[in-house]
Amino acid sequence: MPSPSAVEHVRKRTAKRPTKHSKTRLINEAVAAGNLEALRTLAASKGGFVNHSIRRKVWPLLLHSANKQREMFSEGADEQRDASQIALDVNRSLAHLLQPDTGETRLETLRKELSNLLLTVLSRHSYLHYYQGFHDVASVLLLVLKPTLASACLEPLALFYLRDFMAPSLQSSMNQISLLFPLIALVSPATHECLSSIEGFLPYFCLSWVITWYSHDIDDLSRIARLFDFLIASNPLMPVYLAAAVVLSQNEQLVELEAEYSTVHHFLSKFPSDANLEMLIKQAYNMYKLHPPEAVQKSAKLPLGRASVVNRFKVDFERLPLTQEYDDQLPQKLLNQHVREVEKPGGHYHPDRWVLANARHLAWISAFAATSVIAWYAYQTGYT
């Protein structure tokens, strides 16, 4: 195991804003030494892992998948439970991440590879429930890592980072994003007061950011990959810390808005196209150090559950030695336990209670979503 002094050495060198060349050298030194902690530090420093070529070496190491081989899903295999929804999502995916001159033949090939990638992971772990947005995460891995390596890396992402989102219901996803405002309250009470002054305002606006690791809301693959550098090297709750950083970065515009639900929701739901990702990463990283997940849960009085990926990450995955493979059987037991915790009768997590408590807001968001779908359909069919 690398010594603390070796990690501190990396921190000091990255604090001096190294050039791409010197940053690449630092990364290669950490890879050669098997220093996962140094790689996590480098992921949070400016530029992340620099380019896709380096990411093909580093992401599999951080995901304990460098030596894993996965047989890809074949068309003759048994139909997966979510195959029809996956087909719909895949058929409208990838184009926004590719060069404008990418031909239809290449796009169709990539979509077939994406479908096989998703079905490979979900058929191996049939207890995981596909959600719309998982294909966005998989798309980034496919384009950065290529099919075989992407399959080996998507599995641990699903099992140890995104597992809460792959429960039978959305409750776990909602519980995670419900920590956003309590986190903001710890960092910026004034911003929290501004948001809490809006009757019944809830953080639905960041749902797609969190469950897709921002890949649904950013069109530039290199920018998305930069965020993935950071998120792969972090606790599964880090997307919520990033969401807090995004909100705080727009504080000046936010306070000028009318304090009305739909106005503020509409403003915040648009990920800023000119966002300074390095600044957001730095802010999220600092927030995490000051207010780790257990502290945020305690402050919010909203424990995510002992079996949540957020609370199990260190012991199940982060602390694994470089050469040790993860236990791919453990997540099924933990997900079953987590579902029982989340949906236990009379408990804080009971979905019926949550729905009843938020019925008005769910009705509003459903109406908003329906309007959006109608507008999208009209645009696609030309009835505008």
Image (cartoon, rainbow, N blue to C red):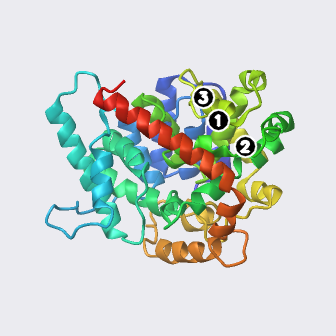
Give the residue number, with chain letter if any, for mark 3: 278
Residue 295 or 1: which is nearer the viewer?
295
The answer to whether one can see residue 66 in this image is: no
CB under 8 Å between callouts 2 and 3? no
Rounded to the nearest angstrom, the CA distance separating label 2 from label 1 is 8 Å
CB under 8 Å between callouts 2 and 1? yes
Compared with 15, 141 (above or below) is below
Q: Residue at the location (60% across, 28% down)? A: 278
Q: Residue at the location (28% across, 60% down)? A: 83
Compared with 126, 299 (above or below) is above
Give the residue number, with chain letter if any, for mark 1: 265
Amino acid type for the residue under numbered disc 1: His
Q: Quadrant of the C terminus?
A: top left
Q: Residue at the location (57% across, 73% down)? A: 339
CB under 8 Å between callouts 3 and 1? no
Question: Upstream in the sequence, badge 2 or badge 1?
Answer: 2
Amino acid type for the residue under numbered disc 3: Glu
